[in-house]
Image (cartoon, grey):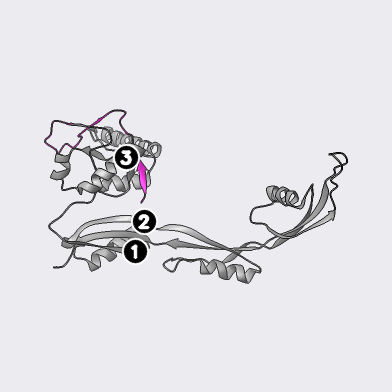
Amino acid sequence: MEYFECDVPSDDGLCSDNACPCPEVVIPRGTGYLYIEQSLVNFRRQYPTLVSARRAMQQTQEQMHADAASSGGTFTGFYRLGPILVCEQGAKLRNLDLRVAAADAKCWWQTGRVPLRATPISLPSIKTESRTFKGESAQEAKEAAKAEIPEDQIISLDVTRDAKEDTAKAEGKNSSEAIEQAKARVPSEAFDVGDAKIIRDRRSGVVEVSAYSENEALVAWKSSAPKDVYLENLQCTLEPKKGFLGLGKKKGTWKVNWSLAFLASVSFKMPAEVTVRFKAKK
């Protein structure tokens, strides 16, 4: 589940649903229900942090003010950056899934995070099913869903994953093995798969380490060794001296043979994914 950031009141909350007839009843901290609109989800998917959301909203409002001024009008629009906290009466009037809406509210109170999906609607008298559809874009996935499920049967259609670029990487003893291993890590549902290429050739080297023991030499080498390096061999070339009562104690010398395997990379895209909840056939 993905989330977006949202301010939390420092004290109790109020029912903020304009569609609820209650007199803005007080909602104690940790309680209530969250109503998350799909339009809010679409906006916060692009701007999941409060800083980015506020900046984007400010830029939008400034542009709309400018457009209104240039046409001789005034701008009076208002946009929300977070969900609506509602009382039980308001949640029931909207037919919200009370269990989910209450859990969302509790999570928001405790963490300041809100699930990046619309609040599900409760339709207890109607049996529902869910299916997932994929496409190279969210729009393509939605069209695939609508092509199979009649629109009047659809209860909700949410984007659960946008299409995104990704990379598969793998090592190998030789370039061919690294490339084959990288290809094998590309998910079967991926598309626009690029050509596998070597992004690091095999390398090897030798370093000397001074230490009082083999284990200490190994630790010292690992602390400064490059990432993903392999130990090929550790050989003592000069034995350490223990001395007597601490006198004459000297470090020994170890020769470390190391190597880095070939590293291959394959770029690809993962499809967008939408989840459809729809009325089940009787």
Residue that mark 3 sits on: 108
As drawn, the residue found furthest toward the top would be: 11
Q: Is residue 37 visible?
A: no
Q: Earlier in the sequence, mark 1 or mark 3?
A: 3
Q: Which residues are magenta?
A: 1-25
Q: Give SS at disc 3.
A: helix
Magenta includes 9? yes
Q: Is residue 57 left or right of residue 97?
A: right
Q: Which residue is mark 1?
A: 134
| 16 relative to 231, above or below | above
Q: Secondary structure at mark 2?
A: strand
Q: Amino acid at mark 2?
A: Arg
Residue under pointer 2: 161
Does 42 sit left or right of 207 as displayed?
Answer: left
Image quadrant where one finds the C terminus: bottom left
Amino acid marked by disc 1: Lys
| Residue 190 rendering spot, x and y as whole percentages | 43, 65
The residue at the point 88 percent across, 41 percent down is: 248
Identity, as a three-letter code, of the amino acid under mark 3? Trp
Q: Residue at the spot x=15%, y=48% of the render?
A: 95
Q: Position of residue 192 (x, y in %)?
A: 45, 65
Image coordinates for residue 278, horizontal then vertical, percent: 20, 61
User: x%, y% of residue 215?
Assistant: 73, 51
Mark 3 and mark 2: Cα distance apart in space: 22 Å
Rendered residue at 23%/48% (across/down)? 99
Q: Residue furthest right?
A: 248
Give the overall secondary structure of the magenta segment: loop
Dot in front, 3 or 2 = 3
Viewer-proximal residue, 61 or 170? Answer: 170
Labels 3 and 2: the sequence-earlier one: 3
Mark 3 burial class by Cα count in 10 Å: few <14, some 14-19, many 20+: many
